[in-house]
Image (tube, grey):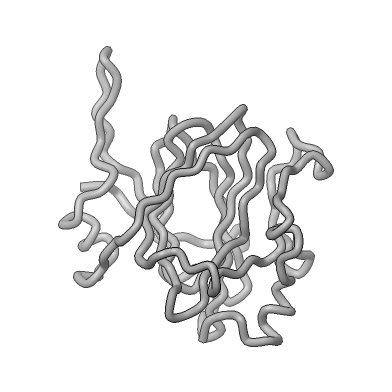
């Protein structure tokens, strides 16, 4: 069974629901094999027998591409099981659950085709990633279907969130963000108009 652990911010604040999953990887001179999803094992990890994935997504991004921070409002909110199958990304989740002790806090980690780590981001979080390799392929399972009308975006560089993106190898001016994400709401704007989670 894969190893899993709950996660904390850099300041040591526990973020309820986020999980880092390390699958059991079998390697030899031919390559490797691992189970990226096993319903029985992951039901134990998530402590949720009703967990059901309905959609698989696959993206390819070049160096410096930043996608996010995306989320969907109820009733189309999504839990996501994320992994990077080619290259290297810095993956970020922001807690948008008003009832949570970690409301407004974020967690970030490198996911890569070398470490094979998976990040479980439950309902109630915004999610995004920055590509740190020449290109990266990201695959993730979702618990709900994509819904354009209920999709929202919070700005990746929102000052109140203070996300510590790894910009040492990338000039901020060179980050490639599409217009939709560039025009995303600030965290405070989303909160003030109620486009977050209870």
In this rendering, does residue 13 appear at all? no
Rendered location of residue 163, percent (x, y)? 69, 58
**Residue pictured at 63% horizontal, 35% vertical:** 132
Q: Is residue 136 above or below residue 21?
A: above
- Rendered position, 154 above or below 29: below
Q: Residue furthest left?
A: 40
Residue at 69 percent across and 38 percent down: it is 64
Residue 50 in the image, given as x and y percentages of width and height: 22, 72
- Depth check: give the residue in front, 105 or 60: 60
Give how far across and how far down residue 118 sits, in percent: 40, 48
Residue 68 in view here: yes
Q: Image check: 154 left or right of 55?
A: right
Residue plotted at (45% across, 73% down): 77
| In-front residue for pair 11/159 | 159
For this view, does 178 lie left or right of residue 102?
right
Image point (65%, 33%), residue name? 63
Give left or right: position of 12 versus 1: right
Q: Quadrant of residue 23?
A: top left
* Count of marks placed on residues: 0
* Residue at the extreme right of the image, as rendered: 173
Q: In the image as oriented, which residue stretches furthest toward the front? A: 149
Q: Is residue 63 above or below residue 166?
A: above
Q: Is residue 82 left or right of residue 152?
A: left
- The residue lying toward the viewer, choosing from 80 and 112, is 80
Q: Position of residue 41 (x, y in %)?
A: 19, 54
């Amino acid at each position: 069974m894969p190893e899993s652990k709950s996660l904390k911010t850099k300041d040591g604040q526990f973020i309820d629901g986020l999980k880092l999953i390390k699958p059991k990887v079998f390697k030899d001179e031919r390559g490797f094999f691992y189970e990226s999803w096993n319903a029985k094992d992951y039901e134990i990890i998530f402590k949720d027998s009703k967990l059901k994935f309905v959609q698989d997504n696959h993206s390819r991004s070049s160096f410096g591409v930043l996608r996010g921070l995306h989320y969907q409002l109820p009733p189309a909110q999504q839990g996501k099981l994320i992994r990077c199958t080619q290259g290297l990304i810095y993956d970020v989740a922001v807690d948008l659950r008003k009832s949570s002790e970690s409301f407004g806090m974020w967690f970030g980690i490198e996911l890569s085709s070398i470490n094979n780590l998976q990040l479980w981001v439950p309902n109630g979080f915004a999610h995004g990633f920055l590509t740190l390799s020449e290109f990266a392929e990201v695959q993730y399972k979702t618990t709900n279907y994509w819904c354009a009308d209920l999709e929202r975006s919070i700005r990746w560089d929102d000052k109140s969130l203070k996300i510590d993106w790894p910009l040492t190898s990338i000039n901020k001016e060179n980050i490639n963000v599409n217009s939709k994400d560039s025009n995303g709401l600030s965290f405070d704007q989303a909160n003030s108009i109620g486009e977050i989670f209870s």
